[in-house]
Amino acid sequence: MTADRSDHPTAGLALAVAGGLGAAIGYAGTNMGLRYVSGLDPFFVSAMKALPTVILAAPWIAAMVWRGQKLVPDRRLLGWMIVTALIGQLGGNVLFQLGLRHAGLALSVPINLGAMIIGGAVAGRTLLGEPITRKVVVASCFLVAATAILSWAPPPDQTGSAATRAMAVSGAPPTTGNMPLGLAANLISGIAYGALGVGLRYCLRGGLPTPVVIGTSTGIGLLVLGAIGLQQIGFSGLAAINHRQWIAMVIAGTLNAIAFVMLTHALKRLGVTVVNLLNATQATLAAVAGVLMFAEPLTTQLTVGVCLTAFGLGVLSLRR
């Protein structure tokens, strides 16, 4: 009898890699939607980003309860998941949204990813005992160099007539060009995302079911960030959000939900650093989207940084 190919180690690894790349594509689309609404309150936008994932996880968890499956095999894991979720939501999502406003899409994503890769590698080695191979080190060096070059790029200058017209078409507000604030927000956000990845892998390896991991992480974001966001914008601010912005948030949240499911699948089989490096494919997509869709400048630093990112990913994909 022929064995089920999904049970084969090679097939499982290939699916995990596909999940990591699929998550990167989904997050790239999410980031485009988030850039479109970067002028709105970052807490409220981040809460709306979490909503579709909560809707996705709710029936999944309900089905587990219906079948009599245990949701929390170890309460300590749930505690770790809650702490991890707060770090990822407050330190990751909110600050990334702030970074998009001040640094633009093409710069924010690679800076954020570089910090995430290094922070995740260190935390994964320290807390999970995951090895850091020479191939990962070389790939990380390319990505860190790309991040450094991209961070030297001038702030987006979107005050000119062409850029203003492009912003009017896309609906996204011009960035303010406060590069120090945007850089700091993206660096801290990347470190928080790295911690989130380690926390997710720790809880998944410990036996916490995938829907519980997904539901807890995003449910906390919806409740905590939603409460803060509504308190800040009030009902008048809520009424001022136009239909295009609502559509952008729905699309961003839906793509984020799909990407998050793929990410958790990849984290079950792959190390945090490898998943983060696969996730770095967002950098190229973000650069293209930033230039073509949001009138962000195509600079020499941006071109070199994207090329270095591609080289880093190429090194990661090489066999021994």
Image (spheres, rainbow, N blue to C red):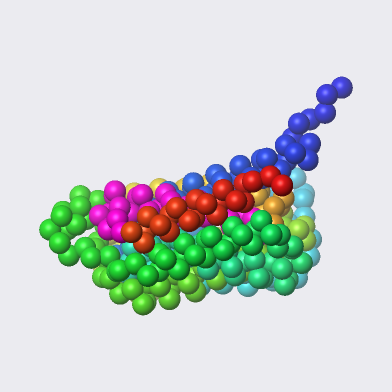
Q: Quadrant of residue 227?
A: bottom left
Q: Is residue 285 highlighted in magenta?
A: yes
- Where residue 87 appears, as percent x and y from the top left, is 56, 72
- For the point 47% across and 62% down, which residue is it? 146
On screen, 54 above or below 63? below
Q: Nearer the viewer, residue 168 or 214?
A: 168
Q: Is residue 44 highlighted in magenta?
A: no
Outermost residue toward the top in this view: 1
The residue range painted magenta reads 272-299
Q: Quadrant of the N terminus?
A: top right
Relative to 151, is 244 on the left or the right? left
- Where residue 100 appears, as percent x and y from the top left, is 37, 64
On screen, 194 above or below 207? below
Figure disc tally:
0
- For the point 42% across and 49% down, which residue is it? 285
Q: Nearer the viewer, residue 53 or 192?
A: 192
Q: Nearer the viewer, residue 136 or 37?
A: 136
Outermost residue toward the right in this view: 1
